[in-house]
Amino acid sequence: GAVVSQHPSRVICKSGTSVKIECRSLDFQATTMFWYRQFPKQSLMLMATSNEGSKATYEQGVEKDKFLINHASLTLSTLTVTSAHPEDSSFYICSAGTSGGRRQYFGPGTRLTVT
Amino acid sequence: DQQVKQNSPSLSVQEGRISILNCDYTNSMFDYFLWYKKYPAEGPTFLISISSIKDKNEDGRFTVFLNKSAKHLSLHIVPSQPGDSAVYFCAASAFSAGGTSYGKLTFGQGTILTVHP
């Protein structure tokens, strides 16, 4: 149980285009989903927290107009990187948590490369 | 401000021996701690967790110890196996001020564990 999927696993896009990453909880309902990014050999940095049906809460320094998050259902959250630039190239990971639960279950990650 | 720190970037252990991974934290509001295992280009996999009301939690070969006064936790793996080779992250969370579970995790920098056959 507690499986989280991400799609796509790998994407290459041109500078200036937008990319959407999907995060799904497959066997449980996720009231809260989290989006992280990880740079090579570094820790996971929380970008934002999204709760189903409400606006996402962004961490300090994360541009909410650039990283659009939608959590339209209890099993799906999306992260859209708008007007992507090479510095947005990174490994993006989502996680999902359940109501009252303290654990987060992570997706397999999405490798974004902006050329 | 690094609220969760893993001061050892890497650890090398012989198969069958004990692996001890350490983690320190500074935020006294943290009351739930987790260890995750991660392979390159994959998401972290949950290993074990501990609440601040406990000082030890065991699950098979994995044991987590919490020393609240020292703000220190450790993960023991006994016996270590080559398949345990990965990056290990500790993470911590705190309840929100309203008393409802918030769930936001703060991660350490990770420790690369290598278990030699």
Image (cartoon, rainbow, N blue to C red):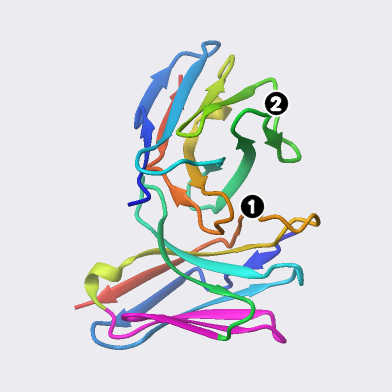
Q: Is residue B81 above or below residue B4?
A: below
Where, quadrant-wise, is the C terminus of chain B in this rendering?
A: bottom left
Q: Position of residue B44 (x, y in %)?
A: 42, 54
Q: Is residue A48 above or below residue B86?
A: above
Q: Within the magenta stretch, is there residue B101?
A: no
How would you rate the neighbour count of disc 1 (Cα within 10 Å): few for under 14, some for 14-19, many for 20 or more? many
User: Which residue matches tag 1?
Assistant: B104
Q: Residue at x 76, y 40 (%)?
A: A60
Q: Chain of mark 1?
A: B
Q: Tell me which segment is drawn in magenta.
A: B56-80
Query: Splitting the image into 4 quarters, where does residue A64 fall?
Result: top right
Q: Position of residue A85 (x, y in %)?
A: 57, 20
Q: Which of the two marks, 2 or 1, is nearer to us in this view?
A: 1
Q: Give the residue at mark 2.
A: A64
Task: Label 2, secondary structure: give it.
Answer: loop
Report the residue at 61% width, 68% height from top.
Answer: B32
Magenta span has B59? Answer: yes
* Residue kind at label 1, given as amino acid type: Lys
Tell if the residue under mark 2 belongs to the same chain as the one under mark 1: no
Of residues A52 and B105, the one drawn nearer to the viewer in this rendering: A52
Number of marks drawn: 2
Report the chain holding disc 2. Answer: A
Q: Amino acid at mark 2?
A: Lys
Residue at far right of view: B97
Q: Which element is circle 1 on?
A: loop
User: Mark 2: few, some, or many residues within 10 Å (few <14, many ≥20)?
Assistant: some
- Kindly report the distance in space between the C-alpha atoms of the residues bearing marks 2 and 1: 18 Å
For the stretch drawn in magenta, what is the main secondary structure? strand
- The residue at 36%/27% (across/down) is A8
Picture quadrant where residue A82 is located: top right
